[in-house]
Image (cartoon, grey):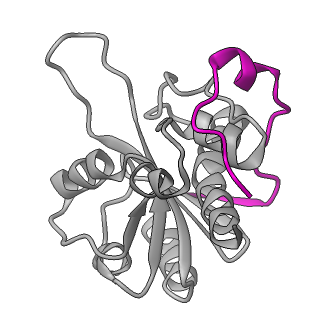
């Protein structure tokens, strides 16, 4: 199959929405993080993304508040403003045998490394590989539109990821962003 090189914002807007409908686990305690790492360390492919509370002040950036990892039928939303990056978690992020699929992963990795130093391994950036399939667009929303024929909602992108409780809409948005990366990657591999 040949993919379109680009897709307009209007074409994306006309597509049906895609969203994750599996299990979402919000991780806010060291025990929950240990359980998440146990599950995730057994996977071979993980969807990967992070969220940071937006700053509307020039020169001010916030720390990564949320790490999303999808694998094995579950999406873990790890609230890094509540739990510290543990050694088992950084071991997953370092392990070259566990593929972590994301979009624009470089900045995500840099943000996570500010919380705890680690050497990234096994990361695949969709933005870097879609060119091999003739796709010029680089946003996750447009890549999903071209490859899957479905749009990813960005409605929650600028919400407060450090809120006391993540809303169901935030949880679904965050889980979808990690999960859809795996969906896109696997679809590319079948082409």
Q: Could you tell me residue 2's position as x and y percent?
A: 69, 52
Q: Is residue 67 above or below residue 43?
A: above
Corner quadrant of residue 67: bottom left
Q: Residue at x 19, y 62 (%)?
A: 116
Per the rendered image, the range of residues in magenta is 1-26
**Which one is nearer the viewer's eye here, 110 or 33?**
110
Q: Residue furthest top?
A: 57
Question: Is residue 20 magenta-colored?
Answer: yes
Q: Is residue 69 above or below residue 115?
A: below
Q: Residue at x 75, y 48 (%)?
A: 148
Q: Could you tell me residue 52's position as x and y percent?
A: 38, 35
Q: Could you tell me residue 76's position as x and y percent?
A: 58, 62
The reply, left or right, for residue 182 in relation to residue 67 is right
The reply, left or right, for residue 79 in relation to residue 17 is left
Q: Is residue 46 above or below residue 140?
A: below
Quarter of the image with the N terminus in it = bottom right
User: What secondary structure prevails in the magenta region?
Assistant: loop
Q: Residue at x 85, y 32 (%)?
A: 16
**Which one is nearer the viewer's eye here, 156 or 126?**
126
Q: Is residue 15 above or below residue 166?
A: above
Asked whether residue 101 appears in the rendered view, the answer is yes
Q: Could you tell me residue 20's position as x and y percent?
A: 76, 51
């Amino acid at each position: 199959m040949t993919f379109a090189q680009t897709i307009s914002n209007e074409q994306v807007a006309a597509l049906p929405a895609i969203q994750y409908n599996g299990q979402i686990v919000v991780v806010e305690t060291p025990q929950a993080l240990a359980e998440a790492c146990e599950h995730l360390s057994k996977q071979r492919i993980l969807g990967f993304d992070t969220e940071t509370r937006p700053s509307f002040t020039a020169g001010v950036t916030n720390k990564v508040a949320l790490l999303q990892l999808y694998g094995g039928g579950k999406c873990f939303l790890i609230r890094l403003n509540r739990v510290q990056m543990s050694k088992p978690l950084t071991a997953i992020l370092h392990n070259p045998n566990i593929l972590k699929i994301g979009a624009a992963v470089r900045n995500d990795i840099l943000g996570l490394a500010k919380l705890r130093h680690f050497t990234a391994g096994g990361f695949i950036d969709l933005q870097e590989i879609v060119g091999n399939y003739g796709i010029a667009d680089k946003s996750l929303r447009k890549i999903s539109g071209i490859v899957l024929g479905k749009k990813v909602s960005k409605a929650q992108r600028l919400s407060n990821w450090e809120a006391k409780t993540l809303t169901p809409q935030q949880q679904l948005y965050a889980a979808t962003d990690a999960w859809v990366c795996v969906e896109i990657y696997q679809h590319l591999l079948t082409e």
